[in-house]
Image (tube, helix red, strand yellow):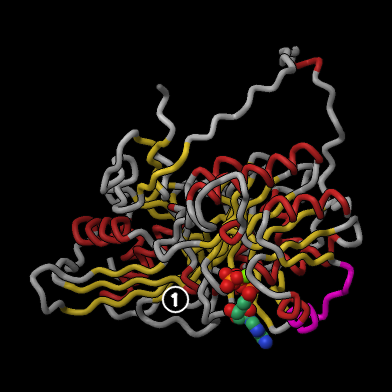
């Protein structure tokens, strides 16, 4: 007889025929739960394959959400039947942004906003505070079937579900919020979106570790996964696309949380700069976020360690990369750092994934080490290798242009960069040259 139940990991969706304490796939403890295996009825209609060239194309025009920064991460706007999962920690502004989006979409069609978390009253209060219009259809409901029925009867052109964790379908036996429920509910909503061509937003909560609560499989069901990140205190919110079937995944949307809601920041480049006079342990670099260059200020602090193995903390940079850059500086530029505690942070805790920020990080650490500020209006761009060599990175011209636009006059760059009128370039081969030319000019 075929087994009726299966054990599934709540984090990654790994399936096993028996219970285990630790998931062999993602390594999380106590996440494996028993689920009933649902066999889908086979449809009577026989599917036939067609030649790719014979597939008729429906017009795939993009529908703007009315929020430029959201359109940017979506890859230019919504498409028909597009399903979007928006994740983020509590209070980061998911409901706020989607309510604003709903308000703009009202001009293009009927928007149904289904909330399983808040009462009509609360949503109305938020809408009043944000000064939004009244055209959005509100539904405070947890039952998937009821939401879909309402979406059909009201002929919704857009559907927003806040949040998928609070939704509940009669077809799955377990409680709301459980893996089975989240998965079945999401599957029902996405099926509706695909069948009717309705763009769909699902809000998803994020656990303490930053992973999407519930099964990772949710990410496979939808077309696009957007994550909110940012410092709650600073009011800056970054929207990143982790997955996008209809566009690039390296675009970044920047918002500021204001009392009027999430305000898009279309020109964020200067936002991460303090504009203060250079201090020791401070350097400016330029990273690319998709097609957009962003200037970032990096700060570091080095102090004698009280321990045999010094503390190393990096906010906004991978700690192993930080340790690597410290080791390169020690071995290739002769700075004594191995007995120092090291701290590094980026302004706004902007994540430095782009290797182009390496040279700025290295100069920032060297400046902290010798307690000398970098010359004013100086920025650095380049990747640093284990041998201490400084290498070029992509889109150099766009980065230089952005630095110049924000008033930087001196740029430390790898060899071979084309000169730019009005910019003083300091080409360097390696970190030793960079440190000596920038921090000890005039000395041979
Ligand atoms: N009067 C106000 N002025 C400015 N900001 C406010 C005001 N009221 C609420 N906020 C901001 O709105 C945020 C809540 O946003 P929102 O409810 O959209 O978040 P969320 O991501 O949907 O949260 P949850 O996961 O709890 O649903 C708060 O963290 C707060 O910063
Ligand atoms: Mg919310």
Which residue is at a point 84% across and 65% down the rendered structure image? 137
Q: Which residues are magenta?
A: 125-135
Quarter of the rendered image showing ligand 2: bottom right
Number of residues whose C-alpha sits closer than 10 Å to that of mark 1, classed few (under 14), some (14–19) or many (20 or more): some
Relative to 423, residue 36 above or below: above
Instruction: Residue at 69% x, 65% y: name it.
Output: 115
**Residue 136 drawn in magenta:** no
Q: Is residue 263 left or right of residue 85?
A: right
x then y, percent, for residue 53: 78, 15
Helix, strand or loop at disc 1? loop
Q: Is residue 30 left or right of residue 282?
A: left
Indicate the quadrant where residue 353 lies: bottom left
Residue 429 seen by the camera: no
Q: Nearer the viewer, residue 96 or 65?
A: 96
Residue 140 in the image, given as x and y percentages of width and height = 72, 67
Q: Which residue is mark 1?
A: 375
């Amino acid at each position: 007889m075929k087994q009726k139940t299966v054990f599934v990991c709540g984090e990654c969706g790994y399936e096993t025929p028996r219970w285990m304490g630790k998931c062999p796939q993602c390594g999380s403890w106590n996440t494996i739960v028993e689920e009933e295996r649902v066999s889908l009825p086979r449809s009577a209609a026989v599917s036939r394959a067609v030649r790719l060239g014979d597939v008729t194309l429906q017009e795939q025009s993009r529908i703007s959400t009315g929020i430029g920064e959201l359109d940017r991460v979506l890859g230019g706007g919504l498409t028909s039947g597009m399903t979007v999962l928006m994740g983020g920690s509590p209070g980061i502004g998911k409901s706020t942004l989607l309510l604003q989006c709903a308000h703009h979409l009202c001009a293009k069609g009927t928007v149904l906003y289904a909330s399983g978390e808040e009462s009509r009253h609360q949503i109305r209060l938020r809408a009043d505070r944000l000064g939004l219009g009244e055209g959005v259809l509100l539904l405070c409901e947890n039952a998937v079937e009821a939401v879909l029925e309402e979406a059909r009867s009201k002929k919704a052109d857009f559907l927003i579900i806040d949040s998928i964790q609070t939704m509940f379908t009669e077809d799955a036996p377990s409680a709301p919020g459980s893996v089975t429920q989240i998965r079945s509910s999401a599957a029902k909503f996405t099926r509706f979106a695909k069948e009717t061509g309705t763009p769909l937003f699902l809000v998803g909560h994020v656990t303490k570790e930053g992973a999407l609560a519930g099964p990772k499989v949710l990410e496979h069901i939808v077309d696009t996964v957007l994550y909110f990140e940012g410092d709650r205190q600073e009011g800056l919110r970054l929207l990143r696309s982790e997955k996008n079937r209809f566009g690039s995944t390296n675009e970044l949307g920047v918002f500021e949380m204001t009392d009027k809601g999430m305000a898009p920041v279309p020109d964020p480049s200067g936002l991460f700069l303090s504009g203060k006079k250079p201090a020791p342990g401070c350097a400016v670099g330029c990273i690319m976020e998709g097609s957009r260059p962003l200037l970032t200020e990096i700060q570091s602090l080095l102090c004698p360690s009280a321990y045999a193995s010094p503390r190393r903390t990096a906010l906004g940079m991978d700690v192993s990369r930080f340790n690597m850059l410290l080791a390169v500086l020690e071995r290739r530029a002769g700075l004594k750092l191995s007995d120092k505690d090291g701290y590094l942070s980026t302004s706004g805790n902007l994540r430095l994934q782009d290797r182009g920020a390496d040279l700025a990080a290295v100069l920032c650490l060297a400046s902290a080490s010798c307690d000398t500020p970098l010359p004013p209006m100086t920025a650095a761009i380049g990747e640093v290798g284990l041998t201490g060599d400084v290498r070029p990175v992509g889109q150099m011209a766009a980065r230089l242009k952005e630095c110049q636009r924000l008033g930087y006059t001196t740029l430390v760059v790898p060899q071979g960069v084309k000169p730019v009128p009005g910019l003083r370039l300091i080409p360097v081969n390696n970190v030793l040259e960079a440190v000596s030319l920038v921090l000890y000019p005039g000395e041979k």
